[in-house]
Amino acid sequence: MVVQSSLLLLLFLLPVAYSGVTYDRKAIIIDGQRRILISGSIHYPRSTPEMWEGLIQKAKDGGLDVIQTYVFWNGHEPSPGNYNFEGRYDLVRFIKAVQKVGLYVHLRIGPYVCAEWNFGGFPVWLKYVPGISFRTDNEPFKIENEYGPESKAFGSAGHSYVNWTAEMAVGLKTGVPWVMCKEDDAPDPVINACNGFYCDSFTPNKPYKPTMWTEAWSGWFTEFGGTIHHRPVEDLAFAVARFIQKGGSFINYYMYHGGTNFGRTAGGPFVTTSYDYDAPIDEYGLVREPKYGHLKELHRAIKLCERALVSTDPTVISLGSLQQAHVFSSQSGGCAAFLSNHNPNSFARVMFNNMHYNVPPWSISILPDCRNVVFNTAKVGVQTSQMQMYPINVRSLMWERYDEEVASLEENSLITTTGLLEQINVTRDTSDYLWYITSVDVSPAEGFLRDRKRPVLMVESAGHALHIFVNGQLSGSAYGSREDRRIKFSGNVNLRAGTNRIALLSVAVGLPNAGVHYELWSTGVLGPVVLHGLDEGSKDLTWQKWSYQLGLKGEAMNLNSLEGASSVEWMQGSLVAQNQQPLTWYRAYFDAPAGNDPLALDMGSMGKGHVWINGQSIGRYWTAYAPSEYCNSCSYRGTYRSPKCQSGCGQPTQRWYHVPRSWLQPTRNLLVVFEELGGDATKISLAKRSLSSVCADVSEWHPTIKNWHIENYGRPEEHHKPKVHLRCAPGQFISAIKFASYGTPIGTCGNFQHGACHSPNSHAILEKMCIGKEKCMVAISQNIFGGDPCRNVMKRVAVEAICSSAARPTS
């Protein structure tokens, strides 16, 4: 997700030779041809190389021409001069995978990426280059990406920096256009472009540049302790059609596949390990229906209009107070029209070209021949797929435990100094964890020892999470949020006569990825740290001697690795479940489940920490609960913003954590968990993500592209009836019809009900045509359903079918 502007390299790779890439005011030009280009963001480090080809093929099948990705500097140069282009960071392999299936690449070179990625894609060592200042006219820093608001904030230095960036990029003579998104004053020949939920009001800063939408937000990211955001596909399709009808010629979905923030790559801070983004392809690589299929049909409809769209500007005709027609009539005789209804509340019956058209609320109908509707953004004809996590029946995990040592912290301290240090300056982000350790001497004569009124410890931290240990025991925890990283802890503590050791474990939850000079933002305990309730009143500990230990002892011993896990004595058996205590390492071994379904770990019984499989980090986990409010009913109608259409209220933001199958070996896979707070590891389980049921809800007047071909080419064929299409996943079959109605059913998938009009044959017909099959289709026809259950009423077929992986029934 981008909230600023970006410098992008349009890099088009073709499987055959090409003559070049240029542009004019209408479109990007490839091999001398103007093109309407549909693109989707897939970030290579957020999936595995074994997933790439399948993801890219699904993108092509979904009607995409282009794959867009950032280049993640901190993944490629983790330390100065040490480069990494292997595994998930094998950028060349990713680009070749795109080329292999015949798509183009839109390469966003950054180096700043935002993207809810740790430190915005910058390596943390960059912060410590002498004399550096991020994202301004600063010699040690120069080069840039996503700069709009920062340019304004930096004034003349920002403006000169933008000009320098553009000159530098164009001077590389790549032979392809460069783009800056959300940079209104992008200098020629760089194209300025738009990001947002809607971009139909955007125009480029020069009349000879094409209109480009570099980020059409398909959903929104999630943060620990927040809800899950959804964007209805009807609204997303409406936004895209609005952009195209205004003359837009390049659209990129951010994201098309969001993927996973493996390891410690999530930024924010507080961004979840899942980066699903409600994208057309979900985190696990499975298509999300109806979003994927409905957009695929949209792309087909747009491509039918392509020649007219790139040949001329639209003529806008008013069809009502909130209704318009955008008509593209080319000199060669081609004609395409977009009929829009911006009223979010009611249908509009409009007259266009001497014909009547009914346009649903908040929608656009596309007519590739200015006559026949082949697609309406609000009429979803593809199935809705309901996914579910199924527990895998594997032998119970035999857990072993190792307790992180708190008692010996001071003996292994890295630094001892007066006062409190900023966390990242100490850790350089090599660990999420930093210990702040000091001591307090208590006289046996202290009053609180007699009256048992425990002193109060107050700690202020710049974030992100904080655990307070007194004499080796957890005394409390506190957390910031993405909106306010700062922490103010206040709690009673148990002190004894003599020397008391106070150890504060400060925890980073991803470094910031956006904001003016965010490299200067602080993390960790900066104080004040004050003890109240003593005979002397208050004791300020801020400026006394503090010792620091970087990271955890278990990290130093590499307990998460295949080699390190064998370097200590682990407690076994019943000892594991006896004490659900903080700062505990757990390990278990498991065999890889059979099949090809995507896998996930159910971490709902745990608190907060990290998890690894065979030494590879699944990412941070945190069973932080979303607020119980905000999850109201969701309608596609009306302007979308991220607070709209939320789910997961009162539930953990993320319970399931993606386990790539390519990380597994057939037997004895090592699972290591580090738990900060205390959880029940015996309830951790492995699950597979699979299709549970499919639904369809299609009217007898649903527009179809096949009928447009009949009209356009004059074939003497009967018009094709709309059809209900149902498809289970490969290896599954339709085992039951949960609901079926031909008539006027009401409700949505999972909650269908019979309406006033219903054909009693509906259920039996769907069973006969679909049971036992992986996929089936049923024409919406009176002949199929044995007559008209209600004359002069537009009827629909609504159906919900159960998908099963069990053996098919024998006939």
Image (tube, rainbow, N blue to C red):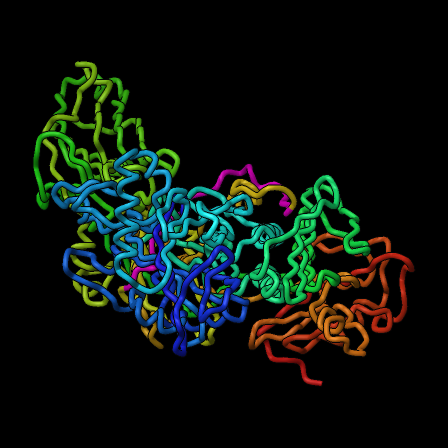
Residue under the point 76% across and 47% down:
347
The magenta segment: 616-636
Report the residue at 30% width, 70% height from top: 92
Q: Which one is in front, 216 or 151? A: 151
Magenta stretch: dominant SS?
A: loop
Q: Is residue 475 visible?
A: no
The C terminus sits in image quarter: bottom right
Q: Where is residue 725 in the image (x, y as percent from the top left)?
A: 68, 70
On screen, residue 2 versus residue 27, left or right, reads left
Comparing 291 with 666, the one in front is: 291
Taking the image as shown, residue 637 lies to the left or right of residue 795, namely left
The reply, left or right, for residue 636 in relation to residue 179 is: right
Q: Which residue is drawn at 49% across and 58% down?
A: 250
- Residue 371 in the image: above or below residue 195: below
- The outermost residue toward the front is 331
> Splitting the image into 4 quarters, where does residue 776 fall?
bottom right
